[in-house]
Image (tube, grey):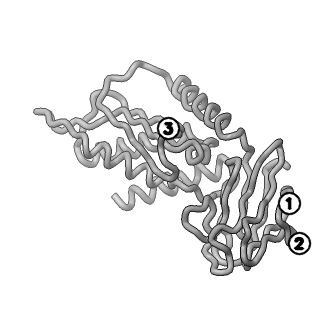
Amino acid sequence: MLQRLQQFEDFVEQLMEGAVGRIFRTTVQPAEIARRLERAMEAQQLATPEGPIVPNDFLVRLHPEDFVQFADFADSLSIQLEEWLLDIAEERDYGFVDQVRVRLIGDPAVPRRQIVVDAKIAELPAEDFGARQLWQRTEVYRVLQDTGNVPRAFLRVSEGPMAGETFLIRKRITTIGRALDNDIVLEALDVSRRHARIEYDAGQFRVVDQGSTNGTFVNGVRVEQAPLRSGDRLTLGTVVLEFSVPGA
């Protein structure tokens, strides 16, 4: 099973890279969603003379600000999660009453960084692949609108701890710091617990220092707040990050 999970993670990395041109960290990892689906399937087995029947209809609910990170490949991710469940069922001799369906939605009632899975055994209405994609893309569009329709932007760590890591920005406010409850967690002692935030408003990104000890610098200049443009270098302590907006 560990090998199968690694195969799933490798495939998802290919999805992410294919969708946005790079691999990036998300606050909720796709492998966490896969494991939560597996547990939901295991927990709701129905014993029958032919063997155990397990849920086939899964609704994955994420906070909209977590869901939006998967906006560019949500339909492909849902299909891969279905394949993951089918592989597990085959390995363990589980049965289904109908096709397996996984859908992802944004739900503000779900706390940040948490995953809620609703699973049931159900006969599903007939639908073709195009209809399923349309449903998922409609949900993506709704969540993008609800979260401010923020365009994709990236912060790539070019110097300091975690060099090479890339973070996706797709929220109106993205917090950065050493504390674990930040959207972007930088593991460096000279980065304050709540160091800075990136805001998006009226078509413009900007960085705002949050009273950090060592300051926030844009292209070598210390700022309290400043606009961010693609190609700018953001320095927090000894960590240097490159800001980029695809297509800018």
Is the residue marked by circle 1 packed among few (<14), some (14-19), or many (20+) residues within 10 Å? Answer: some
In the rendered image, the residue lying farthest to the front is 211
Is the residue marked by circle 3 packed among few (<14), some (14-19), or many (20+) residues within 10 Å? Answer: many
N-term mark: 1 or 3: 3
- Is 67 located above or below residue 28 in the figure? above
Where the N terminus falls, by quadrant? bottom left
Callout 2: SS: strand
Question: At which x and y percent is residue 5?
Answer: 41, 56
Q: Is residue 50 left or right of residue 153?
A: left
Q: Which mark is residue 76?
A: none
Question: At which x and y percent is residue 106?
Answer: 54, 38
Question: At which x and y percent is residue 237?
Answer: 73, 77
Spatial distance from mark 3 to mark 2, Cα to Cα?
A: 42 Å
Instruction: Tell us which disc is closer to us: 1 or 3.
Output: 1
Spatial distance from mark 1 to mark 2, Cα to Cα?
A: 10 Å
Q: Which residue is mark 1?
A: 226
N-term mark: 3 or 2: 3
Q: Is residue 61 left or right of residue 73?
A: left
**Amino acid marked by disc 1:** Ala
Q: Which residue is mark 3?
A: 104
- At 71% across and 47% down in the image, what residue appears? 172
- At 55% across and 56% down in the image, what residue appears? 27
- At 49% across and 48% down in the image, what residue appears? 111
**Amino acid marked by disc 2:** Val
Q: Which residue is mark 2?
A: 221
In the rendered image, the residue lying farthest to the left is 49
- At 72% across and 48% down in the image, what residue appears? 152
Spatial distance from mark 1 to mark 3, Cα to Cα?
A: 36 Å
- Is 168 located above or below residue 63 in the figure? below
